[in-house]
Image: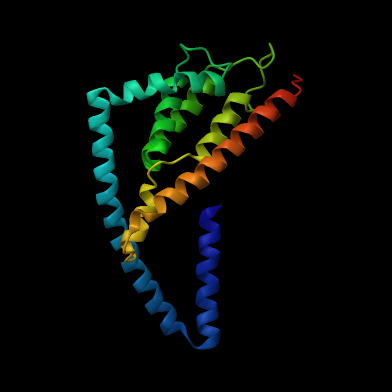
């Protein structure tokens, strides 16, 4: 669907350029944007490589394992129906840690794997198993938390601000923590309310 949207926007831009006699500016704008995109990718590559390196060091040194233990009570509260030996739990924890550190690209594979494991080993809802095409409470809660994404270090935004000449790219940290904290709390409260109200009928 996204490919169709982009194609539609490109076609409209070309048609508008031809109709208004500004097709040359449209072409120049496309070239300049492509150049900026490459520069941004290089900047993002450097910053993400640095933070991924930090993540690897943290994992090898045992810091990630300690963080997982600290998050264990939170995970049990957020996903009370997921057994402690369920294969999705480590992927959920890894996803949350990566999001907190602002490593959205690193969080995505863990999130997909968590959803895959939740689908492979379905969890009964109020004592009943849902059909495979219906998302469980745990799936919905995990998706909302992943989207709201509490972040202590907004790596992507820092990279964008650095690329476009911000004098203090890291000044976004405090507002980002506040905004993502509010969105995450709102999402969790909503999920808890909806999970209690949900009437399971199979």
The residue at the far bottom in this view is 21
Going by the image, does 76 lie left or right of 37?
Answer: right
Colour scheme in the image? rainbow
Q: Which corner quadrant holds the C terminus? A: top right
Seen in the picture, residue 127 relative to 181 is either above or below; the reply is: above
| Picture coordinates of residue 84, whole percent (x, y) | 48, 12
- The answer to whether residue 97 of the structure is visible from this angle is yes
- Residue 136 seen from this side: no
Which residue shows up at 56% across the image and 42% down it? Answer: 182
Q: Is residue 156 left or right of residue 4?
A: left
- Height in image: 200 above or below 165? above
Residue nearest the observer in this picture, 124 or 155: 155
Which residue is rendered at x = 43% and y = 49% of the image? Answer: 174
Q: Nearer the viewer, residue 182 or 4?
A: 182
At x 47%, y 85%, the residue is 22
Q: Is residue 149 above or below residue 61?
A: below
The image quadrant of residue 151 is top left
Residue 148 x %, y %? 53, 41
Identify which residue is drawn at 26% across, 22% down. Answer: 62
Q: How many marks?
A: 0
Query: Residue 137 appears at what percent x and percent y?
Result: 63, 25
The location of residue 59, given as percent across then percent down, is 27, 27
């Amino acid at each position: 669907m996204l490919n169709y949207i982009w194609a539609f926007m490109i076609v409209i831009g070309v048609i508008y350029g031809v109709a208004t006699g500004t097709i040359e500016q449209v072409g120049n704008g496309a070239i300049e944007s492509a150049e900026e995109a490459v520069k941004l990718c290089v900047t993002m590559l450097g910053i993400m490589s640095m933070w991924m390196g930090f993540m690897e060091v943290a994992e090898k040194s045992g810091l990630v394992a300690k963080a997982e233990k600290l998050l264990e009570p939170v995970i049990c509260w957020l996903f009370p129906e997921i057994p402690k030996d369920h294969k999705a739990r480590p992927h959920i924890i890894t996803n949350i840690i990566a999001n907190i550190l602002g490593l959205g690209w690193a969080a995505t594979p863990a999130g997909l794997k968590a959803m895959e494991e939740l689908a492979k080993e379905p969890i009964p809802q109020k004592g009943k198993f849902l059909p495979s095409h219906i998302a469980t409470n745990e799936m919905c809660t995990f998706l909302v938390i992943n989207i709201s994404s509490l972040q202590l270090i907004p790596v992507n935004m820092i990279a964008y601000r650095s690329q476009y000449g911000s004098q203090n790219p890291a000044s976004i940290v405090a507002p980002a923590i506040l905004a993502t904290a509010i969105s995450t709390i709102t999402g969790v409260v909503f999920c808890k309310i909806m999970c209690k109200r949900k009437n399971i009928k199979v």
